[in-house]
Amino acid sequence: MKTNPRAMKGTRQSQSLNSSLKRSLDKLKEKERDKVLTTEELAAAQEAVAYGCIKYADLVHNHNHEYIFSFDKMLDDKGNTAVYLLYAFTRICSIARTANISPEQILDAANNLPMSLQHDKEWKLAKALLRFPEVLMKITKDLCLHHLCEFVYDIATSFTEFYDSCYCVEKDSSGEIVKVNMSRILLCEVTAKILRQCFHILGLKAVSRM
């Protein structure tokens, strides 16, 4: 009896995707995200992680080199993985929500407020973002998307350092907002926009809550 190699490959891919969906949901429930997300948000996060982790794991490597297929590594929320990037993106999205800043207010600030960069981590993030056109030119020439993956990871890690060192929203002991640094909010928004564009190129689905 002859077998169809293409059919077998399709079956293996389908099994991998089904396994990824299950593992992604297990990972989200392990972090108790099912207790804070709506049913729709949980489903969107599950799909973003499940499909994104497989796509990114393939793209992040130089295709001249072999790599080991590992769900455990793909679903790790630390290191250069889709999960880490998606969590970084949702963290950015949460900042404007926490500050109760509307898209209209952000647009108004972008048009009228000069951006002030004073902290070292602000400068590091801004300089990383400025490399975006250069990276796009590079991948259009060599068609190697692992360069874009390296760039996105650099953005995510630079943002994490910025987030840990620079307050965008300050609250008092009662939880009331006492100060919003709009310049830093704008830096967050620029970061989110560039990450979203990179996700689109890489085939990752950006979700605002995860």
Image (tube, helix red, strand yellow):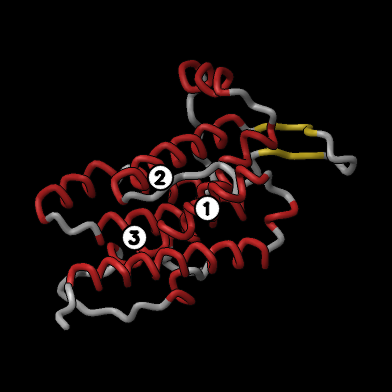
Residue drawn 34% across and 46% down? Answer: 198
Which one is earlier in the sequence, the residue at label 1 or at label 3?
3
- Identify whether 3 is placed above or below 62: below
- Alpha carbon of mark 1 to alpha carbon of mark 2: how far? 9 Å
- Alpha carbon of mark 3 to alpha carbon of mark 2: how far? 16 Å
Which one is earlier in the sequence, the residue at label 3 or at label 2?
3
Secondary structure under badge 1?
A: helix
Secondary structure under badge 3?
A: helix
**CA neighbours of label 3 inside 10 A, class few (<14), some (14 to 19), many (20+):** some
Residue 15 location in percent, x, y? 39, 70
| Residue 153 quadrant | bottom left
Which one is earlier in the sequence, the residue at label 1 or at label 2?
1
The residue singled out by tag 1 in the image is: 88
Q: Nearer the viewer, residue 96 or 18?
A: 18
Question: In front of the other: label 1 or label 3?
Answer: 3
Asked if the residue at tag 2 contacts the one at tag 1, i.e. Cβ–Cβ closer than 8 Å, the answer is: yes
**CA neighbours of label 1 inside 10 A, class few (<14), some (14 to 19), many (20+):** many
Residue 42 location in percent, x, y? 61, 50
Q: Nearer the viewer, residue 31 or 7?
A: 7
Q: Nearer the viewer, residue 88 or 49?
A: 49
Residue type highlighted by circle 2: Leu
